[in-house]
Image (spheres, rainbow, N blue to C red):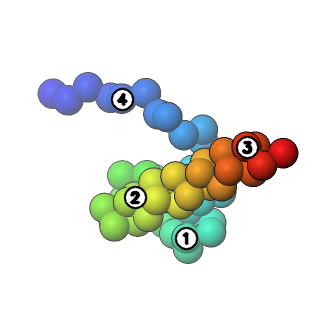
């Protein structure tokens, strides 16, 4: 029996990324467990890019 991990990303960010990456409908109909590993990886990559961009913007102020 596996333990559930606490999510690092907010639910709203996950849904925003799912919409941007084109699998929001799948999540709505079947839940997060139904997305492909590749889609989950792309979500993480996009979230990292967003965080890096925000950090860069913050240091250039």
The residue that disc 3 covers is 59
Q: Which residue is rendered at x = 46% and y = 59% of the image? A: 45
Q: Which residue is rendered at x = 73% and y = 43% of the image? A: 59
The residue that disc 4 covers is 5
Where 23 falls versus 60 (above or below)?
Answer: below
> How far is mark 1 from mark 2, CA to CA?
10 Å
Q: Residues within 10 Å of mark 1 (few under 14, many from 20)?
A: some
The residue that disc 1 covers is 21
Q: Image quadrant for the N terminus?
A: top left
- Counting residues from the start of the chain, the first of labels 3 and 2 encountered is 2
The residue that disc 2 covers is 40
Residue 15, position as x, y percentages in the image: 61, 54
> How far is mark 1 from mark 4, CA to CA?
23 Å
Residue 39, position as x, y percentages in the image: 40, 65
> How far is mark 3 from mark 2, CA to CA?
29 Å
Q: Residues within 10 Å of mark 2 (few under 14, many from 20)?
A: some
Q: Residues within 10 Å of mark 3 (few under 14, many from 20)?
A: few
Badge 1 element: helix
Residue nearer the viewer, 20 or 24: 20
């Amino acid at each position: 029996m596996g333990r559930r991990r606490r999510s690092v990303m907010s639910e709203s960010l996950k849904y925003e990324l799912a919409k941007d990456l084109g699998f929001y409908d799948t999540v709505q109909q079947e839940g997060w467990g139904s997305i492909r590993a590749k889609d989950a990886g792309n979500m993480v990559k996009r979230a990292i890019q967003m965080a890096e961009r925000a950090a860069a913007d913050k240091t250039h102020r």
